[in-house]
Amino acid sequence: MPTFFQNKDSLPPELLARWDCAVAEYDRVLREVCGESETKGLFFYNATREKSALFWRLLNGKEPLPMPPPTNYSYPWYEIIEEPGPHRVGDIGFRAYGKPLGAQLAELRGTDIENFLFIEQCGWRVLSHNTAAQTMLDTLQSGEFILDDQNRLMAAGPEWIVQYREWPAYRLFVQQYRRQTLPRYLNDTLRLVDKSSWSWTNTVVVGEPKDGGVELESDGWFLEKIS
């Protein structure tokens, strides 16, 4: 759980000068989001300001967004809204998607089939998906599968169109990316690949940079706003 600053006294003068305004705006935004709902208040309000991404944003002179952004492991994901993509994502919950919902939850959602993908532990509603995505879903729901299946499914280019609340739609797609590891960690890294991480499919060693590392290339998931 990130801590954005240690305490009020640790802040530099330029941030300390915004403290009172940030406190007032933080409380206003939370009242607007939560209304009279005690449940929403418990979910959104972080009384420990040192751990609040929203408060840190206000303290740095930025305006609040018109509505809460998606979250990334429970923290506001401002970058996905404000910074150009694509944004690499690693934790996606596929297994529940496409399965029947219980009667009570189906009534609340207005659909009898699970139509959310949980990206970085945040629910995004699925608007559509391509044939490769459906093949991947069918394979997941069929039971056991191996790394070769994942490599094949990812190489086929599965793609979903997803949306968080009223924010614009995003494309969830597969793209190659590169990362480095140290030689002593290479075998451990490749063993993780063998454990069927969807973020590390089709992994190959592509080079050895001069700094002594090992460069790997993999297929991974990315989110990009649809313009």
Image (cartoon, helix red, strand yellow):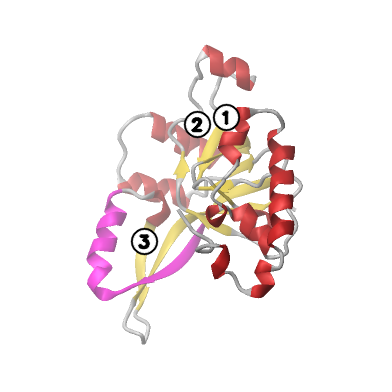
Q: Are marks 3 and 1 in contact (CB under 8 Å)?
A: no
Residue underneath mark 2: 97
In terms of secondary structure, where does tag 2 sit?
A: loop
Residue at the image position 59 percent from the left and 55 percent from the top: 53
Q: Is residue 151 above or below residue 178?
A: above
> Is 10 displayed left or right of 217 in the figure?
right
Q: Which mark is residue 115?
A: 1
Q: Residues within 10 Å of mark 1 (few under 14, many from 20)?
A: many
Q: Residues within 10 Å of mark 2 (few under 14, many from 20)?
A: some
Residue underneath mark 3: 203
Q: Amino acid at mark 1?
A: Asn
> Is 185 displayed left or right of 78 in the figure?
left
Residue at the image position 57 percent from the left and 35 percent from the top: 42
Task: Give the farthest residue toward the front.
Answer: 9
Q: Observer-nearest residue: 75 or 213?
A: 75
Q: Observer-nearest residue: 96 or 132?
A: 96
Q: Amino acid at mark 2?
A: Tyr
Q: Are marks 2 and 1 in contact (CB under 8 Å)?
A: yes
Residue at the image position 33 percent from the left and 78 percent from the top: 213
- The residue stretch that appears in magenta: 174-195
Separation (CA) of disc 3 from disc 2: 26 Å
In the rendering, at what x and y percent does residue 207 appear?
36, 77
Q: Is residue 18 above or below residue 197?
A: below
In the rendering, at what x and y percent does residue 64 appear?
73, 53
